[in-house]
Image: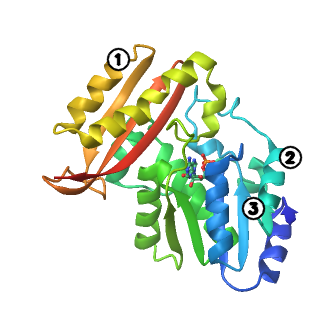
């Protein structure tokens, strides 16, 4: 595995890459969810390129940028295990040599709902860094997790609207055996919070079986006073208004103590 930190090193590694090139973008603190993306990439492409970058642009003041877990040595071990060929680990100075960029990707009105409503500027920051990393890594295919379902849709929209020659593929959410979706932020949870956090996946599962999914999901959150619900919504698979029947998506976000978690599942409405 070739670990590169500068643009020059990345360009040399990219120029030497053979066949189809897959990219998996992460903020590090890698877990089995990231590993699933890397293994899928390994199975489907000739060269697997991993990026690890905690992007300051997508954190609002007061969010967890400073305390976001940084575990580079363990991340590189997991990457080697997953068969990564190139790991790009830039510093903010490498990514933003002029400081915060004046020109940013406008995510459009779809970014005003759900995560974008709770975290203003989040998708501007995400799409700007994803666009930059696409330019720097020039992948044929890129893998993103359904765990961040709205983000996956926003990235697909950017690729379509900007005519980027990249095949974006979604990978299903990896969960703990008890249902908790894997997240780098799960490390913040104290044991009692870890237990309380199960309400997210439980509410989604119960809602998916209920005649009134949103009411059922919200009622399940009421059983867990330690957890403060941000949103629990039913949409169509493209995050538009909920359909009367057929495929749909349930999405939720909630605060467990000082930790904000998100989760979502597919549903079939009868
Ligand atoms: P992050 O490091 O949290 O920014 O995530 C990097 C990539 O891994 C994104 O495409 C995420 O959607 C994906 N990812 C994170 N957690 C999971 C999970 N539990 N299952 C599948 N993909 C995930």
Q: Are marks 2 and 1 in contact (CB under 8 Å)?
A: no
Question: Is ligand 1 within 8 Å of the beta carbon of the residue shown at mark 1?
Answer: no
Quick one: label 1, few (<14), some, or many (20+) residues within 10 Å? few
- Compared with residue 245, is residue 222 higher up or lower down, i.e. above or below? above
| Quarter placement of the N terminus | bottom right
Residue in view at x 72 percent, y 62 percent: 50
| Residue at disc 1, secondary structure | loop
| Residue at disc 3, secondary structure | loop
Question: Is ligand 1 within 8 Å of the beta carbon of the residue shown at mark 3?
Answer: no
Of 93 and 261, which appears nearest the observer? 261
Number of the label disc, if any, that sits on residue 82: 3
Residue at mark 2 to residue at mark 1: CA–CA distance: 40 Å
Coloring basis for residues: rainbow
Q: What residue did someone put label 2 on?
A: 73
- Pinpoint residue 88: horizontal percent, then vertical percent: 78, 60
| Residue at disc 2, secondary structure | helix
Quick one: label 2, few (<14), some, or many (20+) residues within 10 Å? few
Q: Given the current orientation, which residue lies at the most extreme front position?
A: 177
Q: Are marks 1 and 3 in contact (CB under 8 Å)?
A: no
Q: Nearer the viewer, mark 2 or mark 1?
A: 1
- Compared with residue 69, is residue 17 higher up or lower down, i.e. above or below? below
């Amino acid at each position: 595995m070739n670990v590169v930190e500068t643009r020059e090193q990345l360009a040399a590694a990219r120029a030497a890459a053979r066949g189809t090139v897959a990219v998996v973008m992460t903020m590090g603190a890698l877990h089995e969810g990231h590993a699933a993306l890397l293994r899928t990439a390994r199975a489907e492409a000739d060269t697997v390129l991993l990026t690890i970058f905690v992007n300051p642009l997508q954190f609002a003041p007061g969010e967890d940028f400073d305390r976001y877990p940084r575990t580079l040595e363990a991340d590189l071990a997991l990457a080697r295990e997953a068969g990564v060929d190139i790991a790009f680990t830039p510093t903010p100075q490498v990514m933003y040599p002029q400081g915060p960029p004046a020109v940013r990707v406008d995510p459009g009105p779809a970014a005003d709902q759900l995560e974008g409503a709770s975290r203003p500027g989040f998708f501007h920051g995400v799409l700007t860094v994803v666009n930059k990393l696409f330019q720097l890594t020039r992948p044929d295919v890129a893998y993103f997790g359904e765990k961040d379902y709205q983000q996956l849709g926003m990235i697909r929209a950017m690729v379509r609207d900007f005519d980027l020659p990249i095949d974006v593929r979604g990978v299903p959410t990896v969960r703990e055996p008890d249902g908790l979706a894997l997240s780098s932020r799960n490390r913040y949870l104290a044991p009692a919070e870890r237990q309380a956090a199960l309400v997210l996946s439980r509410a989604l599962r119960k809602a998916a079986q209920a005649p009134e999914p949103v009411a059922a999901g919200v009622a399940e959150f009421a059983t867990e006073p330690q957890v403060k619900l941000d949103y629990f919504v039913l949409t169509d698979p493209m995050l538009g208004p909920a359909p009367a029947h057929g495929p749909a998506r349930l999405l939720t976000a909630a605060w467990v103590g000082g930790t904000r978690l998100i989760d979502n599942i597919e549903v079939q409405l009868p």
